[in-house]
Image (cartoon, grey):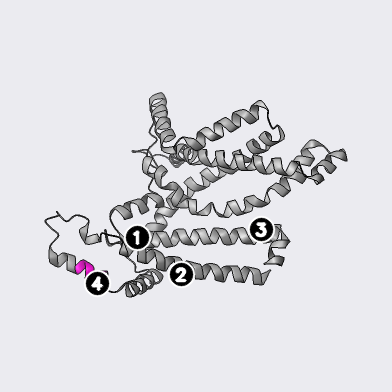
């Protein structure tokens, strides 16, 4: 088991280096540079552009720029092109803003998907199964930003309360209990919108896995022994149907960045996804590359966690690897 974990860890570290090299090359080869963001700016003189290029090593070969970027990233001295602020604290603060939104949406997805999928599978062809299938396909088909705007309009018109941002303006001096409730309110709607498509997809996947498992011989044998239906479903069928979801759990970690861009932009949520979007518009190379590196790290960490959990859940994985 130790060799399996060590080998998986080394493979992902090597892949992370390869991904960082490719991302660095793609970002720098793409058209546009920070000095070209606003060429009509009268304050931007040729000598200012030359200073920017020299300060951020833009005239150096790509391989040397990569070395400078990694050196500054590891030492913590990497700074943004846009405002000169340190990149790592800026990303960390935005990450802490995105984390509650991600955790709330993930909690909603996993707590709603399994009961809906299991109930639809064991009552296949019933009214609940047809209704849940229709709702799931509707949630998958209709864009999330459309739901978001409808929900914003409905809540604002019905209750006349703000839903944009992380907090209500003017609540800074309110008691801590009111501030906590205000933060929870502002978190609720974005988390619901983020969870809609996830619930639809995962519930369909749970349904298909459960339908496949309940038709196996050991489930029919358990029923033939006279066991209660709840015991058959939750102790025999569900345990074997859960194995594929171990992989899905690890792959949800990159949603901290990629899955939050649209929702954070609509709700003006100052998270890491919105920060990456703003960095792309500003051609802020250090910020773009570091966020991409962070996203790649989350992806590889998620797959590593999935492999380890799968190895514990199914010994055949580590015996055959």
Is residue 86 among what the camera can see?
A: no
Neighbours of disc 3 within 10 Å: few (<14), some (14-19), many (20+): some
Q: Earlier in the sequence, mark 3 or mark 1?
A: 1
**Mark closer to the observer (1, 4):** 4
Which residue of the protein is positioned furthest toward the right in this rendering? Answer: 225
Does any portion of residue 100 appear in the rendered image? yes
Q: CA distance from mark 4 to mark 3?
A: 47 Å
Labels 1 and 2 touching (C-beta < 8 A)? no
| Residue with the mark numbered 4 | 59
How far apart, in angstroms, are the residues tagged by discs 1 and 4? Answer: 19 Å
Name the outermost residue toward the top. Answer: 158
Marker disc for residue 17:
2
20 relative to 39, above or below: below
Residue 203 is situated, as x and y percent measured from the top left of the image, at 60, 39
- State if disc 1 and disc 3 touch (CB < 8 Å): no
- Does residue 91 appear left or right of residue 102 in this picture? left
Q: Position of residue 165 (x, y in %)?
A: 37, 41
The answer to which of marks 1 and 2 sits earlier in the sequence is 2
Q: Quadrant of the N terminus?
A: bottom right
Q: Secondary structure at mark 2?
A: helix
| Residue at screen point 71% across, 43% down | 212
Asked which secondary structure carries label 1, the reply is: helix
Q: CA distance from mark 4 to mark 2?
A: 23 Å
Instruction: Judge by depth and name the residue closer to the eye, 145 or 287.
Output: 145
Range of residues picked out in magenta: 51-60
- Distance of label 3 from label 1 (alpha carbons): 34 Å
Distance of label 1 from label 2 (alpha carbons): 17 Å
Q: Residue at x 40, y 35 (%)?
A: 163
Q: Which image quadrant for residue 202? A: top right
Residue of label 1: 287
Q: Which residue is mark 3?
A: 310
């Amino acid at each position: 088991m130790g060799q399996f974990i060590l080998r998986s860890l080394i493979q992902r570290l090597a892949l992370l280096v390869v991904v960082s090299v490719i991302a660095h090359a793609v970002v720098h080869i793409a058209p546009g540079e920070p000095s070209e963001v606003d060429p009509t700016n009268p304050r931007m003189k040729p000598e200012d552009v030359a200073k920017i290029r020299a300060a951020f090593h833009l005239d150096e070969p790509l391989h040397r720029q990569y070395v400078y970027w990694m050196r500054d990233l590891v030492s913590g001295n990497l700074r943004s092109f846009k405002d000169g602020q340190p990149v790592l604290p800026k990303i960390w603060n935005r990450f802490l803003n995105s984390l509650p939104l991600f955790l709330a949406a993930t909690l909603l997805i996993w707590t709603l998907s399994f009961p809906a999928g299991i109930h639809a599978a064991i009552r296949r062809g019933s009214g609940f199964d047809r209704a849940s299938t229709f709702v799931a396909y509707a949630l998958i088909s209709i864009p999330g930003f459309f739901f978001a705007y409808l929900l914003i309009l409905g809540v604002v018109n019905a209750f006349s309360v703000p839903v944009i941002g992380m907090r209500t303006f003017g609540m800074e001096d309110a008691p801590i209990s009111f501030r906590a409730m205000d933060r929870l309110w502002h978190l609720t709607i974005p988390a619901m919108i983020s969870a809609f498509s996830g619930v639809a997809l995962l519930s369909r996947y749970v349904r298909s896995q459960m339908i496949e498992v309940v038709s196996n011989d050991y489930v029919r044998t358990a029923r033939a022994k006279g066991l209660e239906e709840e015991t058959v479903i939750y102790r025999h069928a569900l345990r074997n149907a859960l194995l594929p979801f171990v992989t899905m759990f690890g792959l949800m970690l990159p949603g901290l960045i990629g899955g939050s861009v649209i929702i954070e932009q609509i709700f003006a949520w100052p998270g890491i996804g919105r920060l990456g979007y703003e960095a792309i518009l500003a051609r802020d190379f250090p910020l773009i590359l570091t966020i991409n590196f962070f996203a790649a790290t989350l992806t590889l960490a998620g797959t590593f966690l999935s492999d380890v959990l799968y190895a514990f859940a199914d010994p055949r994985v580590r015996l055959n690897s």
